[in-house]
Image (cartoon, rainbow, N blue to C red):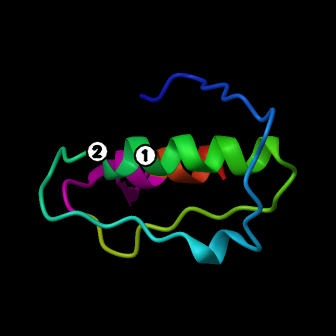
Amino acid sequence: YMPAITLSTDQPKKIKSAGDVFITGTDTSAGKTFISALLLDYFNQLGMSTIGLKPLASGCIKREGFLQNEDALILMEKA
């Protein structure tokens, strides 16, 4: 679960595209999804088109006949 996040956009820095940002980490619970969700919210508030990707996921659960990962669902919701 990720709470709604509102960030100040008073003086945003110019980023050409969401493709300029890549989040990586080497440990579970390092905060990758949390930081990614913050950035997606921020870029969306700036009016940018965003997409959050989690190309590999572990810890999936079966819901409605499909394997789903909580982090991937959070990124989909925030994008």
Crowding near the residue tagged with mark 2, few <14, some 14–19, many ≥20 C-alpha atoms within 10 Å: few
Q: Nearer the viewer, residue 6 or 2?
A: 6
Among all residues in the image, which is located at the extreme right? 47
- The answer to whether one can see residue 43 in this image is yes
Q: Where does residue 66 sit, x and y in percent of width and height?
A: 41, 59
Disc 1: which residue: 35
Span shown in magenta? 58-72
Among all residues in the image, which is located at the extreme left? 27
**Residue 66 against residue 16 in the figure, above or below:** above
Q: Where does residue 62 sit, x and y in percent of width and height?
A: 31, 51
Name the amino acid type tagged 2.
Answer: Gly
Q: Where does residue 48 sit, x and y in percent of width and height?
A: 82, 58
Name the amino acid type tagged 1.
Answer: Ile
The answer to whether the residues at label 2 and label 1 have Cβ atoms under 8 Å apart is: yes
Quadrant housing residue 29: top left
**Residue 35 against residue 26 in the figure, above or below:** above
Q: Where does residue 10 sit, x and y in percent of width and height?
A: 81, 32
Q: Nearer the viewer, residue 62 or 4?
A: 4
Residue drawn at x 20%, y 62% as measured from the top left: 58
| Residue 15 belongs to magenta span | no
Q: Nearer the viewer, residue 56 or 16?
A: 16
